[in-house]
Amino acid sequence: MFFGVTVSFVVIKYKKIQQEDTAATYKLLPRQGAAANSVEWTAAKNNTDNLLAKLTANPRDHKAALALANAYILEARITGNAAYYDKAALNTVENILATDHQHHEALMLKSLLQLSQHHFAEGLETAQLAEKINANNAFVYGLLVDANIEMGNYEAAVDAADKMVSARPDLRSYSRIAYIREIHGDYNGAINAMQLAVQAGVPAEEATEWCRSQLGKLYELTGNAENARLQYQLSLAARPGYAHALAGMGRIASTQKKYDSAVYYFEQAALIISDLGIKQNLAQVYLYAGQPKKATALNNEVIREMKKNTNNISDDPSAGHYSDKEIAYAYLQQNDMDKALEHALAEYNRRPKNIEVNETMAWVYYKRNEFAKALPYATASLVTNARNPILLCTAGLINAEAGNKTQAKLMLQAALQLQPAIPEEIKTKSVQALQKL
């Protein structure tokens, strides 16, 4: 009886939330920093207000609803406020699917939102359903690329990427080709593809500058700090105050041990966009800059926010954001090894084939001095022949501790030979380990 009453209460609560969401009107929230005074912001606000007015007049105007959902999705990218805008977009999309459950564009946006919230298995399932309805669409293959990568289905991701770029060679497809090449160890090919993505985009648009920032990051990982800095400067010139370019400048400054400059850049980025990854980086550079109290306070804030976003899932299965991989690293920074392992395992249980998740598991066990447990995860993280220097350093350190000296030496040499931009702790440990081998 108790179980039945509890389940009924949860169902009633969930239905009430759904009803409230259906009736809710989601207006654009004010932007922060330089973005608050841009012409783009005025246009975005006017566009959204017009679309909301159309839907008020005709709730079944699917064309307006799709345009509104896309506006919310773009605003989430620009501001980082995914908690608000993902919910707004998903509510809008679900209203379409309530009257047309096979609406192709609505299904694709639903998949995109599920992936944004790190509901990767659900996003893959929705994308596959959309593909069955219409297989002649480049965007659906982009969703299949993203979902399959996150789930660790790398062959399926490559196949989807080939279909996408064949159907529509543009910024979206080139950027995905770049990432496919990166995780398979082809950095030259990844850089070439991301250059094509930038060239295919319109300067100053968020998507173009995001690709440019990813190009900068590829240059960082291959030790080309000057070219990376150039990309970030170009991005900031085209789109003043662009947070991901500011974060890139912060990473370069941190790698060069210019910690005061790194703090400045990350603080500026954090003022503009609500991005917990940027805040994690800021907490790390606070530590390097000799400000441990600020580092601890910010890291605690990040953990609280991530857990809050995750806990939203219990109230509304369609909302909330899985962040266990990121929370695991935050707890490592706090030296809470048990909590780090708990969250790393939660992420691993959802997607055990993903190479980054395996690297997280490996690093957590390494930090716990459980090297035998770390080794199989380190091996699994390199299954695609990834040459990411962080992955290679992690695997090299673990192999060194496990007594596999020859493998460890090769991995650490490969990771460090180009002097890539990697976290200071990993770099220091790797240099010390290599000197002993």
Image (tube, grey):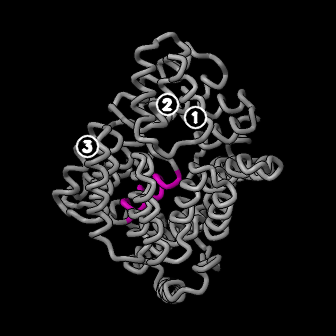
Residue tagged by mark 1? 426
Residue at the spot 64% in from the left edge and 58% down from the top edge: 262
Circle 1/circle 2 CB separation < 8 Å: yes
Residue type at tag 2: Cys
Q: CA distance from mark 1 to mark 2?
A: 7 Å
The image quadrant of residue 6 is top right
Left or right of 228: which side holds 270? right
Q: Earlier in the sequence, mark 3 or mark 2?
A: 3
Residue at the spot 71% in from the left edge and 32% down from the top edge: 339
The magenta-colored residue range is 106-117
| Farthest top residue in view | 403
Res 393 label: 2
| Farthest right residue in view | 293
Left or right of 360: which side holds 176? left
Circle 3/circle 1 CB separation < 8 Å: no
Choose mark 3 or mark 2, whichever is in front. Answer: 2
Q: CA distance from mark 3 to mark 2?
A: 26 Å
Residue tagged by mark 3? 158
The image quadrant of residue 424 is top right
Q: CA distance from mark 3 to mark 1?
A: 30 Å
Judge whether residue 196 can be spotted in this image: yes
